[in-house]
Amino acid sequence: MAQTVLVTGGTGFIAGWCIVHLLERGHAVRTTVRDLTKEQRVRAAAGAANSDRLTVVVADLNDDRGWDAAVAGCDYVLHVASPLGGGTTTSRNALIAPARDGTLRVLRAAAKAGVKRVVMTSAAAAARPPLTSQRASDETVWSDPDDPQFDAYRVSKILAERAAWDFVRAEGKETLLTTILPGAVFGPIRDAENLGSVQIIQGLLRGRPGALPRLGFWIVDVRDLADLHVRAMTAESAAGQRFIAAGEFMWMEDMAKTLRAQLGAAGAKTSTRRLPDFVVRLLLPFMANLRSLAPLLGRRFPLNTDKARQVLGFTPRPVAMTLVECARSLVD
């Protein structure tokens, strides 16, 4: 049965694919932007098909206005929007307020409107224990926002998810919320702006960095992530639950080798040279896209995704496919 679903942050990478998946399943979709001048971008990313079931409205995570109207009449909400930024103290403060307070604005409006469920995009880092603990990341772990391994963006995700669960527990509405905790999100882009983590692939295609640090990622395809959001939206077993979303772990060096091997001329600039760890520690402060990952240098931390696979049927596609199709979309 077709439902009306609000997707927050309609210009975003993940939100764009959520919109596509919902429209393909016959739902009516409402999505938020901060400025209506972005409406055509949202519609172009969604594709021409079924666009008559897509509505774009104005609502800002930093402002109370607009959220009651955005949620009114909706059966479900996919709260995907979140601010992005760097790792300085200033950006940390700037990121936490809109992430945490914006989440609470969405949840209050959803609870008031009688929405059946809010599916919120958190981050796998929100379920990561201290790196020295040897404990695997799973949904029972609640990360410490004061742990120095986390940059400003990840701290904002940790605190926003905590605030969300605190809110629904205080209201006695735990079943209103489900959270999805993705790893590094790659895959085909539908819009050349707001690339998020795809900037890492873009950099590799452009030959940056020229030599690769020993960094790795638990990777999830954006299409599989969007599908998981939609599954979690209606599955009874997902109510009041957290789900880590990730496929395979891959080192940057292996990511680069995959791109060079499968992209031909388009991957020719991609470096596969390894940079010694001591050199990386000297250079990371100058590597904007990667410096926040310095605590993870050389670490392949364990992560458990059994819950999403068993409860929601999450079946991530091969990471090599994700990387190549992501890169080809950037080239195109």
Image: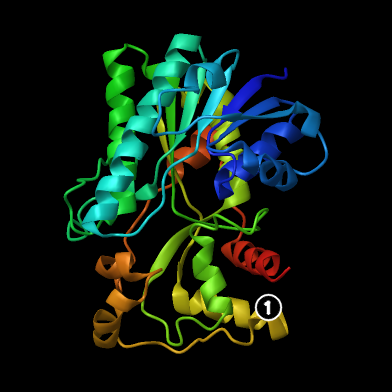
Near mark 1 (Cα within 10 A), the count class, few <14, some 14-19 or many ≥20, is some
Residue name at image x 32 percent, y 66 percent = 293
Which is nearer the eye, 111 or 246?
111
Give residue 92's position: percent from left, percent from top. 26, 51
Is residue 135 visible from the viewing direction of this image? no
Q: Is mark 1 on a helix, strand or loop?
A: helix
Q: Is residue 22 left or right of residue 209?
A: right
Residue in the foreground of this view, choosing between 141 and 283: 283
Residue 200: % across, % down: 49, 68
- Looking at the image, the residue that sits furthest to the right is 49
Q: Is residue 326 visible?
A: yes
Q: Which colour scheme is used?
A: rainbow
Give the left or right position of residue 171, taking residue 49 as reference: left
Please name the amino acid that badge 1 sits on.
Gln
User: Looking at the figure, which quarter contains the C terminus?
Assistant: bottom right
Residue 32: x and y in percent read: 57, 32
318, above or below 122, in the image: below
Write the residue at 68% across / 78% down. Answer: 262
Which of the image's four quarters has the N terminus?
A: top right
Percent across and percent down for residue 214 are 36, 77
Q: How many labels does the image show?
A: 1
Residue placed under numbered mark 1 in the picture:
262
* Rendered residue at 62%/82% (across/down): 260
- Is residue 288 placed above or below 144 in the rendered structure? below
> Quadrant location of residue 149?
bottom left
